[in-house]
Image (cartoon, rainbow, N blue to C red):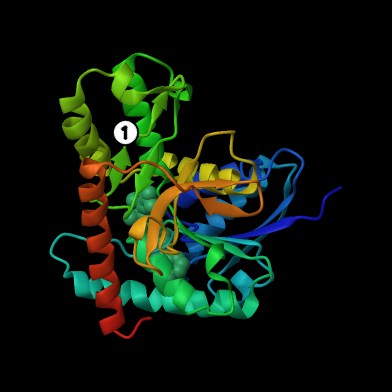
Amino acid sequence: SKAPITVAVTGAAGQIGYSLLFRIASGALFGPDQPVNLRLIEIEPALGALSGVCMELDDCAFPLLNSITPTADLDEGFKGVNWGILVGSVPRKAGMERKDLLKINGGIFTNQGKAIEKNAASDVRVLVVGNPCNTNCLIAMNNAKGVPSDRWFAMTRLDENRAKSQLAAKAGVHNTSVSNLAIWGNHSATQYPDFYNAKIDGKPVTDVISDHDWLKGDFISTVQQRGAAIIKARGLSSAASAANAACDTVYSLTHPTAEGDWTSVAVCSDGSYGIEKGLMFSFPVRTDGSKWEIVQGVPVNEFSQAKIKATEDELREERAAVTELGLI
Ligand code: NAX
């Protein structure tokens, strides 16, 4: 049988963790014949709750789950890790200054970056989910210079999935009919879900959906504000759908992309599409299952250009703020 793949999850006792761990243990990331080791990283006060989650993982008797290691020690947590999924963070709360938020997360992600560089396997790849995810990823990456920049990802797949489901509903088709949906930029309210290049059953979305005012207006704002709508309805932020998107992201980065299609994930910009190098920016990406690339030559019209510029400006500002704080 195959050697296990070791996956670390931070914030493992949180809401997203409660969905994510069970999906990972049942084979959602690497398939039904690939065993996994789980390293579950939490802060000390949450270790009690985490022990309950571990009991439940035991009680599933998952055939693919080889070992479970709950810990508050980053060295132990990241030892030999092949994939790190960084979920635990402190998201912005009402009344919180952005600077305070960046400072708190700066502490978390500088230490995690250093611990990954020191302890992880030589093939480690890292997906940051905890918000502000693009900038948290930027901080971790810059504190782990020994880990190549093409190993770092921040999650915009939930936005892609949300956008696909909105377009499918509007067109009256199943969501599997929607392809080539790129999210550009930051996982925030400035993100740009690019309907101009998206397709429904291989045809341009703008041909299939005649209501272009809806595409340019309500479609974009619905995707941008979906997280807030879920908080309003549920009283809690999206968790199962976020865990699902994390599984989709890792699956997509480790399996070949369908011919002609792409997926969305924030990666370290190489200057493609004029985006400033070094920013963690969501692009259309494809992979052969091991090496990924930013899809080149996707048409960007004037409308798209303005949206992409706005989200790039926001990411530049976030980077300037964490640079000023000495975090990168
Ligand atoms: P919860 O508050 O339920 O769980 C977070 C967990 O992280 C807690 O158990 C906490 O003890 C732990 N934690 C805090 N600091 C830690 C540290 N330094 N090391 C290890 N663990 C630590 O939040 P949850 O709903 O699970 O959301 C987690 C993060 O995902 C939030 O930042 C949230 O904003 C973000 N999201 C990102 C999304 C995306 O698309 N990129 C969508 C969903 C979600 O909003």
The answer to whether residue 44 is visible is: yes
Rendered position, 143 above or below 91: below
- Residue located at (29% from left, 61% from top): 91
- Residue located at (20% from left, 25% from top): 212
Of the pair 171 and 89, the residue shown nearer to us: 171
Q: Classify residue 218 as left or right of residue 328.
A: left
Give residue 129's quadrant in the image: bottom left
Q: Position of residue 121 (x, y in %)?
A: 69, 70
Of the pair 199 and 24, the residue shown nearer to us: 199
Q: Classify residue 12 as left or right of residue 205.
A: right
The residue at label 1 has a CB less than 8 Å from ligand 1: no
Crowd class of label 1 (few under 14; some 14 to 19; many from 20; radius 10 Å)? many
Q: Residue furthest left?
A: 95
SS of the residue under disc 1: loop
Q: Position of residue 89 (x, y in %)?
A: 38, 64
Q: Position of residue 321 (x, y in %)?
A: 24, 76
Of the pair 147 and 24, the residue shown nearer to us: 147
Mark 1 — residue? 196
- Residue located at (25% from left, 48% from top): 305
**Which quadrant would the C terminus be assigned to in this image?**
bottom left
Q: How many numbered callouts?
A: 1
Q: Residue furthest bottom?
A: 326
Ligand 1 falls in which quarter? bottom left
Q: Amino acid at mark 1?
A: Tyr
Q: Classify residue 47 as left or right of residue 107.
A: right
Rendered position, 34 above or below 214: below
- Residue located at (37% from left, 66% from top): 279
Give residue 183's quadrant in the image: top left
The answer to whether residue 74 is visible is: no
Q: Position of residue 251 (x, y in %)?
A: 59, 44
Rendered position, 187 above or below 324: above
